[in-house]
Each structure stands twice: as C-alpha cells, then as structure tokens.
Image (tube, grey):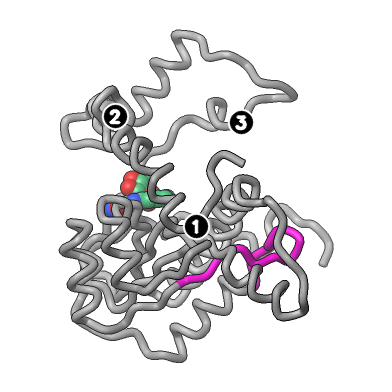
Amino acid sequence: MSPTGDSDLAKIFMDIVYTRRSVRRYKPEKIPLDHIRIIMEAAQRAPTDAALHLWTAIHVRDDEKKRRIAELTGQKHIDEGSDFFLFIADLYRLKKLLEYRGEEMGDVDHALLLFAAIDAGLAAENMALAAVSLGYGTCFIGAIHNATEEIIELLKLPKKTYPLFGLVVGVPDEEPPLRPRLPLEMLFHSEEYHDYSEDMLDEGYKAMAPITRRGDYLRLLKRYVGREGYFVIRNKELPRLLEKMGFKINP
Ligand SMILES: Cc1cc2nc3c(=O)[nH]c(=O)nc-3n(C[C@H](O)[C@H](O)[C@H](O)COP(=O)(O)O)c2cc1C
C-alpha cells in the first residue's frame, strides 16, 4: 500500500479515533462472543517488545464478579458494562516458558515491568478502537489500584504478575462529548525537549478547562498528583505490593 494523506482507510481510522470517548453508562446487554473475539484479536495483533507478550488480560464476563470489582473500585460502569478486561503485567508466563525448556529468567523485573505496561497499553488501545469500530463503548479503569490486593485475590493472580489497568466494554447508553486534550505543541516537541513558557502553560490550562464541570483543570491535577493526591497513596503502596507479588524491587 502506498502512503496517501486522504485514503478512505485514513478517514475511517481517524473517524474511529475521534468517535472513541470514555463511556460510563451502558445498557444491560451482553456483547455477542464473536464480537468479543474480534476485539481480542485486535489486542493480539498489537506490537509487543521482542515478541515477549508481556501482558495478559483476564476477561471477566460474569455479572457477580463484575459487580464485586465495581464495588471494590467504586466504578459502577464496570458492573454496567457487558465485559471487563483486567490487563496485567505478566512475567509469570515468560518464567514458565523458560523453565519448561530448562532455562531461568534473569534479573529483569524493573525493566520488564516498564515494558509490560507499554505492551499492555498498546494491546488495550487496539481493543478499544476495535470495540468502537463495532459500535461499542469502552472505558479504561485505573481505579483498580484502589483495591489492588483484593483484585489480585479475586482473580487469582500468581506471583510475577501485577494488575495494570482495566477496560470496560459494553453497549453504550450515553454519547459523551469529545473531551479536551493539551495542545499538540505541548505533547510534541520539535527535535529536542523545549521548556514551557508561561503563555504555553496558560494555553494548557485553557485547553483543558472543559475537562471538569467547573472548568478547573488545576483542581483535577491536585486531586490526582498533588501533595495528597491519589497517586501519592498508590506510590507509597507500590513497593510493598510489588514485593508481595514476587518482584525484586531493589536488585
Ligand atoms: C490508564 C487509564 C486509567 C483510567 N482510569 C479511569 C478510571 O478508573 N475510571 C474512569 O471512569 N475513567 C478512567 N480513565 C478514563 C480517563 O478519565 C479518560 O480517558 C480521560 O478523561 C479522557 O477522556 P476520553 O477518554 O473521553 O477522551 C482512565 C484512562 C486511562 C488511559
């Protein structure tokens, strides 16, 4: 295929990209399993570092289990959606593959966890876009980190795995607005890193204002990454939880 700026495929692709929004209201309908399979195949085809496949997704379709995860995380849309996928960093399968042929895994935990998050993110976004192309809605769920240990136990995750995020897929019952993003100039820096001028920072706040009802992006930033933000708590917990799951955190 030769590169063209305006092919039908490019238009379809960008249409899908712009149609995808986080959906938090779903109809109580189940997605047919043949559609679920297409969505899973989209994830399977995502690139994976060195063909290592550092992720696994636990497919939760059982309503009772979804309800429990929704309660644990405080995200009711997990319960409402048809299917839930928990994406985990999976070094356990690699270890098994090596040991099965008499080899051992080296000291790789830090580096592989980083790449596992990349692999999983790529696979999940492929899934989300495939779901949108079939008319479904999706929502990524980081709130699984509000109840990491309970989720590990509920879904029986073995050592050398770690939950990364969830993905809800379902029949949408809302049409959310296109949500804002920081300007392209803040996300892409030409040729080298450029620091942010005050004008640019103002532009960032202006662009992101519609993300909250009050038009206050700073409030959102403080809630997540300020001194008492959610991520401060997650950050404190992470070393202990990783150690509990069999990762060497200070080799
Ligand atoms: C890694 C990740 C974790 C997220 N966690 C949650 C979550 O726990 N609950 C939720 O409702 N939305 C969650 N979201 C959705 C974001 O809030 C959403 O993508 C963002 O506000 C932009 O909106 P849009 O997806 O409609 O463009 C998450 C998104 C990502 C990528």
Residue, x 77% and y 76% (percent of image)?
102
* Residue named by callout 1: 246
Mark 2 or 1, nearer chain start:
2
Residue plotted at (64% across, 75% down): 96
Give the class, few, some or many, for how many residues have Cα within 10 Å of label 3's Cα (few <14, many ≥20): few
Q: Give residue 69's position: percent from left, percent from top.
A: 24, 67
Q: Quadrant of residue 95?
A: bottom right
Give amino acid for label 2.
Ala
Tell me, yes or no, whether the highlighted magenta stretch contains residue 47.
yes
Circle 3 is placed at which residue position?
Answer: 188
Total marks drawn?
A: 3
Q: Nearer the viewer, residue 162 or 185?
A: 162
* Mark 2 secondary-structure assignment: helix
Q: Residue at image x 50%, y 69%?
A: 127
Ligand 1 is within 8 Å of the C-beta of the residue at disc 2: no
Whether residue 92 sits left or right of residue 165 in the image: it is right
Quarter placement of the C terminus: top right
Which sits in the foreground, 131 or 245? Answer: 245
Residues at marks 2 and 1, CA–CA distance in whole angstroms: 42 Å
Q: Could you tell me if the residues under marks 3 and 2 are in contact, i.e. CB atoms within 8 Å?
A: no
* Disc ID at residue 139: none
Residue 203 visible in image: yes
- SS assignment at label 3: loop
Q: For this rendering, which residue is in front, 11 or 176?
A: 176
Q: Amino acid at mark 1?
A: Gly
